[in-house]
């Protein structure tokens, strides 16, 4: 059975929706995301939007944009997995938001109450592969589906 272009896009965008939903479920289960985990979510959201646009206005450009989003999140996931494995260093900065209006006491309270989530520690893994690693692998597969959809005629 050969899937049509729109079916392929629905599978690819649905895959991003499933991965994004899984990330939120892990968060609800008590695995707070680190900075790089959050970076990996945005391209999935973009792929979902591109998939929805494709349903209304099918075009090769949109399919390639979906592939780009999948490749971006795969790249971030691979980078994150490398940081977790100690193959290279991760980002050294963190964001605390606007702290200019906080008193020293309020700032100290915010720091003491903040949950520390390190990007270089594996919070969960399956078959020796972390969530970031699985995101990289599965997102590469989604990118191939998007590319197949871009190459297929309407």
Image (cartoon, rainbow, N blue to C red):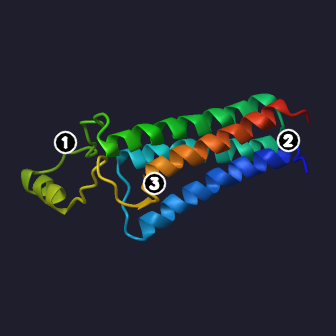
Name the residue located 62 percent from the left edge and 58 percent from the top edge: 18
Q: Residues within 10 Å of mark 1 (few under 14, many from 20)?
A: few
**Horizontal and vertical percent for residue 149?**
80, 37
**Horizontal and vertical percent for residue 102?**
16, 50
Name the residue located 76 percent from the left edge and 42 percent from the top edge: 53
The dot on residue 118 is none
Name the residue located 32 percent from the left edge and 36 percent from the top edge: 87
Give residue 116's quadrant in the image: bottom left
* Earlier residue among tags 1 and 2: 2
Q: Which label sits in the foreground, 1 or 2?
A: 2
- Total numbered labels placed on residues in the image: 3
* Earlier residue among tags 3 and 1: 1
* Horizontal side, residue 84 vs residue 54: left or right: left
Figure check: 91 above or below 137? above
The dot on residue 100 is 1
Cα gap from disc 3 to disc 1, whole angstroms:
35 Å
**Horizontal and vertical percent for residue 66?**
68, 37
Q: Which residue is mark 3?
A: 131
Q: Residues within 10 Å of mark 2 (few under 14, many from 20)?
A: many
Q: Secondary structure at mark 3?
A: helix
Nearer to me, 142 or 50: 142
Q: Secondary structure at mark 1?
A: loop
Q: Which label sits in the foreground, 3 or 1?
A: 3
Q: Quadrant of the C terminus?
A: top right
**Horizontal and vertical percent for residue 7?**
83, 49
The residue furthest left is 104
Q: Secondary structure at mark 2?
A: helix
* Horizontal side, residue 67 vs residue 28: left or right: right
Q: Which residue is mark 2?
A: 5
* Earlier residue among tags 2 and 3: 2
Cα gap from disc 1 to disc 2, whole angstroms:
51 Å
């Amino acid at each position: 059975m050969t899937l049509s272009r729109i079916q392929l896009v629905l599978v690819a965008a649905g895959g991003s929706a499933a991965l994004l939903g899984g990330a939120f479920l892990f968060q609800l289960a008590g695995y707070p995301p680190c900075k790089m985990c959050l970076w990996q979510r945005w391209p999935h959201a973009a792929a979902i939007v591109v998939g929805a646009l494709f349903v209304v206005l099918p075009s090769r450009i949109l399919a390639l944009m979906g592939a780009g989003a999948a490749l971006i999140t795969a790249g971030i996931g691979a980078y994150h997995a490398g940081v977790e494995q100690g193959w290279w260093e991760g980002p050294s900065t963190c964001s605390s938001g606007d702290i200019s209006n906080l008193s020293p006491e309020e700032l100290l309270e915010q720091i003491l109450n903040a949950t520390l989530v390190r990007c270089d520690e594996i919070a969960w893994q399956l078959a020796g592969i972390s969530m970031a690693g699985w995101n990289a692998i599965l997102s590469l597969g989604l990118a191939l589906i998007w590319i197949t959809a871009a190459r297929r005629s309407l």
